[in-house]
Amino acid sequence: MYKMETTEKQLAVVKDSGHLKGIWRLNYTLINPNGIAGFGGKMLANYPDAVTGKERILLDPNGQEQAGYHINHTSQDFDPERNPKHRLIIDWLIGSPEVTVPMNQVRIDKRYAEHKLSNNRAKLTNLDHQDLSSLDDEETIDKVVGIIVLDGGPKALGIDKLRFILSRLNLTYYDLKHVSDPTTEKKKLRKKLKDFIRTSLKNAKAVEDVIENLDEAKFVYEIKEMIRLDILQINNGMYMYHGNQIGISFESLMKYFKDNVEFYTELTGKLYSKLKK
């Protein structure tokens, strides 16, 4: 590898070395049809610094200049806290326009992020930061599940509210096998919702949003029940009432009812009369 003495000290890309703590992993995505067998490595060249405009050169611990960094493996770990060479490589990689770095994992001048190329095949991540993120995700999921399983108090969700939430999420909100046994059906619906929440952080947040907007969820539930009980009909994709078109989509039907509150109140009266039978 080409080396030469450097004549000018470079400032680090990451100003606070504390942000380089933990294990970092460099992954390189292959696109050749032969996979790893056809991988001959990838050279990341020295690059113009996004902040200074000067060429940023990779240095070794002795201050010797390198031609860049050669990726020899599709996945490689670095420990910049304990290895001075790794510290220099990671700092250089973070500034490279050819390396994608999650910006929530390190504090750098935004100009480095702005100069990143799109569709980079090299990605650098802090594994310790990922572990913390996973813990945060688990806590959020556990918090939402905790709301679902409450049996008492003003925040407890009875079977009706469980139906509202499930219907808003486009999930089945009746358990036909146990519909005549409210206690068992509530357990079944609760389990369905817990399973949905635990599938992903995205689902947990979706449920949390619905719980915070239960009136809207109830509105969706009531409209779906009107359709189920044939108070409203769907004909060729159109929502109808006594042969009159009142919506071309579910969203437009919701808007129609919000604009015609008295008519909606009349229909919900019919709905709850049917539900009591």
Image (spheres, rainbow, N blue to C red):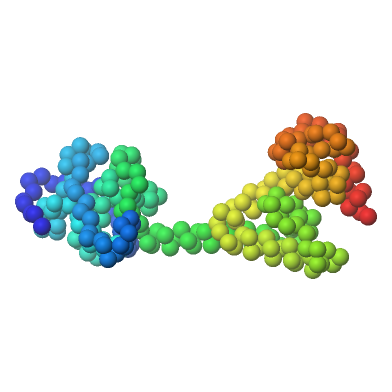
Q: In this view, does 262 lie above or below 2?
A: above
Q: Which quadrant, please, contains the C terminus? A: bottom right
Q: In this view, does 25 lie above or below 250?
A: below
The quadrant in which residue 130 appears is bottom left
Q: In this view, does 133 lie above or below 178?
A: above
Question: Residue 269 location, x and y as percent?
Answer: 90, 43
Question: Residue 103 location, x and y as percent?
Answer: 37, 48
Q: How many labels does the image show?
A: 0
Q: Is residue 249 left or right of residue 65?
A: right
Q: Which of these two is toward me, 150 or 76? A: 76
Q: In this view, does 90 lie to the left or right of 190?
A: left
Residue under the image location 64 percent in, 64 percent down: 195
Residue under the image location 69 percent in, 52 percent down: 170
Residue under the image location 27 percent in, 54 percent down: 17
Q: Is residue 19 left or right of residue 149?
A: left
The quadrant in which residue 276 appears is bottom right
Q: Which of these two is toward me, 45 or 38? A: 38
Residue under the image location 28 percent in, 48 percent down: 98
Which residue extends farthest top? 259
